[in-house]
Image (cartoon, grey):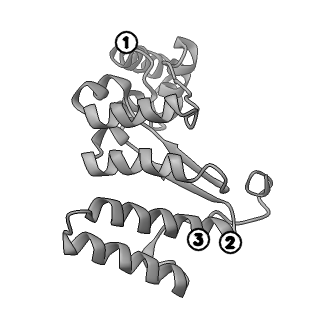
Amino acid sequence: ADIARGDRPIELLCFAGLPDPHRRLAVEARRAARRRLPAFGVALFDALALLIGEIATAQPLVLMLEDLHWADGLSARFLAFLGRRLRRLPVLVVGTMRPEEMLDAPILAQAVQELRSDGALAELVLGPLPQADGLRLAELLQPAGRDQSQRARIAAEIWTASAGCPFIIVESIR
């Protein structure tokens, strides 16, 4: 609630900016990964969960994870591990992924299913933009100097190619 009101800053997980006790935990996590012990995954997961938990006890924490469909297997497993460990802490993990890419990411699909089964996952499926909104976005992003008919024609072409995907609309204008 404090984050939503803007009363507290959102702390990003960045080793260089961590206070000393947190930096020590981050260094330990990296050491565990370098040692390549047989149980290094568990040790690394425990160290990272402890680090995130320590930060979250000081203030609420938001972790943004974009393009999860590109995550390696170990990262996908950590996501499920973290979801089971942080239930009582003020941590919000927000991840983005393309469902169509899940076919090529079976470990991530399994992690998502585990989180879903445990009730630790709230999903928000974003569909394409409605045509009117997509056309308006494409028109607004175009450089100045084009007349309205040219802007409308280009917007219509982009809308057709994008099928309402905002990313494609924005990248097409660039």
Q: Is residue 99 above or below residue 7?
A: above
Rendered image quadrant of residue 143: top left
Q: Is residue 83 above or below residue 69?
A: below
Which amino acid type corresponds to the residue marked 1 in the rendered image?
Answer: Thr
- The Cα atoms of the two marked residues, 2 and 1, are separated by 49 Å
The reply to whether discs 1 and 3 touch (Cβ–Cβ < 8 Å) is no
Q: Residue at x 53, y 84 (%)?
A: 21
Which amino acid type corresponds to the residue marked 2 in the rendered image?
Answer: Ala
Q: Mark 2 — residue?
A: 58
Q: Residues within 10 Å of mark 1 (few under 14, many from 20)?
A: some
Q: Is residue 26 above or below residue 52?
A: below
Q: Mark 1 — residue?
A: 160
Q: Earlier in the sequence, mark 2 or mark 1?
A: 2
Foreground label between 1 and 3: 3
> Residue reaching furthest bottom?
20
The reply to whether discs 2 and 1 touch (Cβ–Cβ < 8 Å) is no
SS category of the residue bearing label 2: helix
Where's residue 98, x and y in %? 37, 29
| Of the pair 121 and 152, the residue shown nearer to us | 121
Q: Mark 3 — residue?
A: 54
Where's residue 51, x and y in %? 50, 70
- The Cα atoms of the two marked residues, 1 and 3, are separated by 48 Å
Where's residue 43, x and y in %? 35, 66
Residue 38 tag number: none
Q: Earlier in the sequence, mark 1 or mark 3?
A: 3
Rendered image quadrant of residue 28: bottom left
Please give left or right for residue 47 compared with residue 172 in the image: right
Please give left or right for residue 10 compared with residue 163 in the image: right
Is residue 100 among the parts visible in the rendering?
Answer: yes
Which amino acid type corresponds to the residue marked 3 in the rendered image?
Answer: Glu
The reply to whether discs 2 and 3 touch (Cβ–Cβ < 8 Å) is yes
